[in-house]
Amino acid sequence: MSQDIEGNLWPFYVVADESGSMYAYMDELNEGLGSLRRALLAQPLTAAKIRFTLIGFSDDAIVRSHLVDMREAAELTPLESRIGTCYQAAFNLLRELIPADVETLKARRYAVYRPTVFFLSDGEPNDALDWPNTHRQLVDRTVHRAAPNIIACGIGDVRADVIRQVATQPQYAFVTVPGVDIGQAITEFCTALTKSVVASVQTFGTGADSLIVEPPAGFRVTLDEV
Amino acid sequence: MDPRRPAADSAADRWAPVVVGRPVAEFAPAPPGPWLHHTDVLGGYRPDTVCDGWSTGALTVRLASVRGYSHRYERTPRQDDAVVVAHPPTGAVAFAVADGVSGAAQSHLGATLACQLAVAGVLDALDDGRPIDWPTLFAGTGHQLVAYAQDLLGLSAPEPAQAIALLATALVAGVVHPPGQLGDGATAALARIGDSGGWLLGAGTFHDAFGADGDAAAAEPVRTSAVLALPSAAADVAPAVRDFPVPPDAVLLVGTDGFGVPLGKGSGLVGHLFAGTLARRPTALELAHTLDFSRETFDDDRTLLAIWPDPEPR
């Protein structure tokens, strides 16, 4: 028989590129994350099961909001554009943060579902040789048993093969179609993020495969060549 | 009663949800969505709550099945169901409890059908005076779910994959024999596929009838919601089967995970609530009211069947 638990929680992480090239789109991104919060406020049963963490990365990674209960948060701390695109910094932070967060929640006697990361980037990482090894450790369930699922979305100039490498399943990797408006793409990313979170949490403990990923409009699934 | 409060409030308070810890957000339950257009034998009406209660003279039965808060919010029908019937020739009580898998489009029908088929199989065995072959009974139930789906979908041949997508359900079925039939005391047999469960509650302590299975699930580092179900894609999925005595001072409980997950080991707030309620053999309505407790993030459908050996059989 399972332990006596206080509740069921699903940690979600949004990891967003704060590099200089994102400067023009920060308002769309912060507004989109605000709409996620408002959508969850309108879904109190769903919101109760979510703890939300927002991380921005450039040359380093910063936790902007941590394990937030959206019903109680006034506003999310906004993302800010900075310099650099260091994937290694983002994955290093996640590698430390996620196992610690899971243990914290379990210590509070919550049943914790596998964490889910939504990753958004608009450009090439400037640490192309360094990040893959850290990423492998992050997603390796033999390294830490609560390794996350990662949904990766690339916008603008990002290379499809890089995004495919970040995502933990081929069907979790999306890049914008050529010529799409970047600001609109970011808005669509946030819309898909909201739909995915709500739909997934509504299947919580129902016997269905719970992680539902809503493809963002204006994006395509990256396909592997064989 | 608090004399400072008007009488009208006390009636409302009496039937307000029992709050355990932090409650679910308050809202008015929505009716199930418009996809319940069935005119076949299972009917299209799906009440929010059902309850039942009676005694054979040797065994006392209480049953409740309540729609989860999430389904009330999302306009979804109660996907749990249960059947419990007496078998007068043997004095036994046959039952089944099912939890439709939400990912299946009409899993509430799957749950209802699985319960009816499983209990029919148990009654047939009791009529014939033969032991219950649980693997065959569950396999037969699975096959009939596939046949039902074929009929419902108008398919020319059985399609197990489509039946799973339409009707998948967890199922626990069983029988309780009264004292004197198979031994001095009451005895129970339980069989299950999926994550519905069974417990013996005695002296305020819950004992998991499927303990080994449950412990394996608890050891998972993160929770998984994947469950086995009927019909199954794999031909060799057999039910877990348990046979055990029901002591005279104990009550057999059979329930879906909507009850089992918040119960946990039974030593927390939910366990205390039910140990207290079941100790006084509640009415069917009281059991339903208690089962509808409000506890944040526990918003699945809940079904609970309780069977007591009567201390002085009639």
Image (spheres, coloured by chain):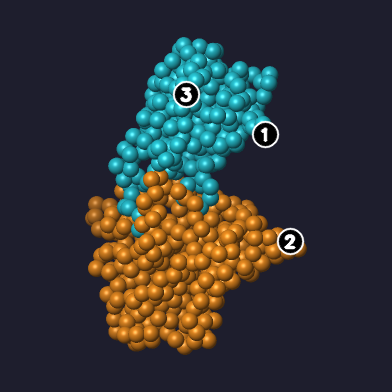
Chain colours: A cyan, B orange
Residue B287 in the image: x percent, y percent?
37, 65
Of the 4 image quadrants, the one containing the C terminus of chain A is top right
Q: Which mark is residue B155?
A: 2
Judging depth in this view, the residue of A94 and A181 nearest the camera is: A94
Of the 4 image quadrants, the one containing the N terminus of chain A is bottom left
Q: Amino acid at mark 1?
A: Val
Q: Are marks 3 and 1 on the same chain?
A: yes
Cα–Cα span, label 3 and label 2: 52 Å
**Residue A50 visible in the current orientation:** no
Judging depth in this view, the residue of B190 and A74 nearest the camera is: B190
In the picture, measured across the screen, residue B123 lies left or right of residue B278, that is: right
Q: Which residue is mark 1?
A: A226
Q: Amino acid at mark 2?
A: Leu
Disc 3 versus disc 1: nearer the observer? 1
Q: Is residue B152 above or below residue A105?
A: below
Hey, which quadrant is residue A143 in on the image?
top left
Q: Counting other residues with Cα less than 10 Å from the Cα at mark 3, is it few (<14), some (14-19), or many (20 or more)? A: some
* Secondary element type, mark 1: loop
* Secondary element type, mark 2: loop
**Chain containing mark 2:** B
CB of mark 2 within 8 Å of CB of mark 1? Answer: no
Q: Which mark is residue A131?
A: 3
